[in-house]
């Protein structure tokens, strides 16, 4: 029983730190968002599943990052899933 618990905790820790090894900043770093999974014309859900973009902006979910890329004609990628370590001072609709 203890071995199973330790294994589960280690698995969870590995999942949480999976995306944190990328360098800060550059849009060429990080993981490409799976924008093809969303119909952005219909809008994004309001489910909070935060992703930190390579621009150090916190997006409420991956769909919102894709939406902002489409609107701004940028290529911000996913730096890591979850909160940003050093968030950008920019606070706009990307955080809604």
Image (tube, rainbow, N blue to C red):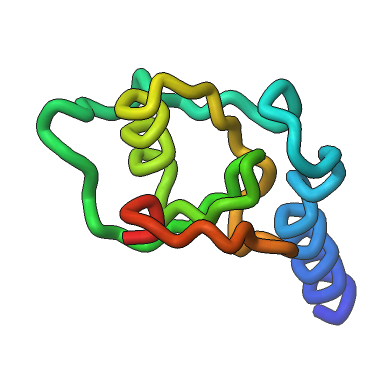
**Residue 91 place in picture, x, y as percent:** 45, 61
Tell me the quadrant of the picture where the C terminus can be found: bottom left
Residue 2, percent from left and from top: 86, 80
Which residue extends farthest bottom?
Answer: 2
The residue positioned 32% from the left and 33% from the top of the image is: 67
Nearest the viewer among 38 and 74 is 74
Please say if 57 is above or below 64: below
Judge by depth and name the residue closer to the eye, 18 or 94: 94
Q: Position of residue 1 (x, y in %)?
A: 81, 79
Q: Quadrant of residue 78?
A: top right
Q: Nearer the viewer, residue 17 or 53?
A: 53
Residue 68 falls left or right of residue 40: right
Residue 9 spot, x, y in % from top left:
79, 70
**Residue sitting at the far left:** 42
Q: Is residue 34 left or right of residue 24?
A: left
Q: Residue at x 59, y 43 (%)?
A: 53
Comparing 65 with 46, the one in front is: 65
Q: Is residue 39 above or below residue 17?
A: above
Q: Residue at x 24, y 58 (%)?
A: 46
Residue shown at the point (41%, 28%) measured from the top left: 69
Q: Quadrant of residue 84?
A: bottom right
């Amino acid at each position: 029983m203890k071995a199973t618990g330790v294994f589960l905790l280690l698995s969870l820790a590995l999942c949480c730190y999976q995306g944190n090894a990328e360098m800060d900043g550059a849009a060429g770093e990080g993981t490409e968002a799976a924008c093809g999974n969303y119909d952005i014309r219909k809008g994004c859900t309001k489910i909070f599943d935060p992703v930190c973009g390579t621009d150090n902006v916190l997006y409420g979910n991956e769909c919102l990052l894709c939406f902002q890329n489409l609107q701004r004609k940028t290529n911000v990628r996913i730096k890591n899933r979850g909160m940003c370590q050093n968030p950008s001072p920019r606070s706009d609709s990307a955080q809604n």
